[in-house]
Image (cartoon, grey):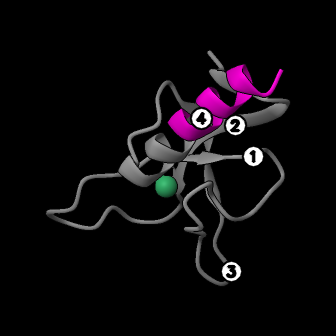
Amino acid sequence: MLNIITLADRTFVALRKAGRPVPGRERVYHAVTPYCRPALCAEEPGNGSGWEEPPHHEVTCRKCLERLERLRHRGTSDH
Ligand SMILES: [Zn+2]
């Protein structure tokens, strides 16, 4: 199941950084535009790394959520 978020003509999926889980740290799913490296919150995977597929069903990064929320409001007021 692929959960694609579309807001104001922009598309995002919930992805987390590839690699081993960090003990004691929750995995965070960021809002990432497909084929685009940095997440909405400007986080990005390290050198030689990438985003891990498949996308999650929801974004859990607080910063990304805030920005998505802002985009959502902008999307409705500008049109
Ligand atoms: Zn994020």
Quadrant holding the C terminus: top right
State whether the magenta stretch is mostly helix, strand or loop: helix
Choose the circle earlier in sequence order: 4 or 3: 3
Which portion, as a residue range, is magenta?
A: 69-79
Mark 3 secondary-structure assignment: loop
Find disc 4 in the rendering and name its residue.
Answer: 55
Residue at mark 2: 12
Instruction: Between label 4 and label 1, give the one nearer the viewer.
Output: 1
| Kind of residue at disc 3 | Gly
Q: Residue 53: which numbered mark, if any?
A: none
Where is residue 73, by image quadrant? top right
Q: Quadrant of the N terminus?
A: top right
74 over 34 or under it: above or below: above
Q: Which residue is mark 3?
A: 48
Q: Earlier in the sequence, mark 4 or mark 1?
A: 1
Residue contact between numbered discs 2 and 1, judged by CB atoms under 8 Å:
yes
Q: Position of residue 62 (x, y in %)?
A: 36, 48
At a point 80% along the width and 57% down the height, the residue shown is 36
Foreground tag (4 vs 3): 4
Out of 64 and 44, give the one closest to the viewer: 64
Q: Which residue is mark 1?
A: 33
Per the image, label 4 sits on a secondary structure element best described as strand
Label 4 vs label 1: CA separation? 11 Å
Q: SS at mark 1?
A: loop
Label 3 packing within 10 angstroms: few (<14), some (14-19), many (20+): few
Residue type at mark 1: give it: Thr
Residue beneath the point at 78% across and 29% down = 8
Magenta stretch containing residue 77, yes or no?
yes
Q: Nearer the viewer, residue 41 or 45?
A: 41
C-alpha distance separating marks 4 and 2: 10 Å
Q: Are marks 4 and 2 in contact (CB under 8 Å)?
A: no
Question: Relative to the observer, which residue lies in front, 47 or 59?
Answer: 59
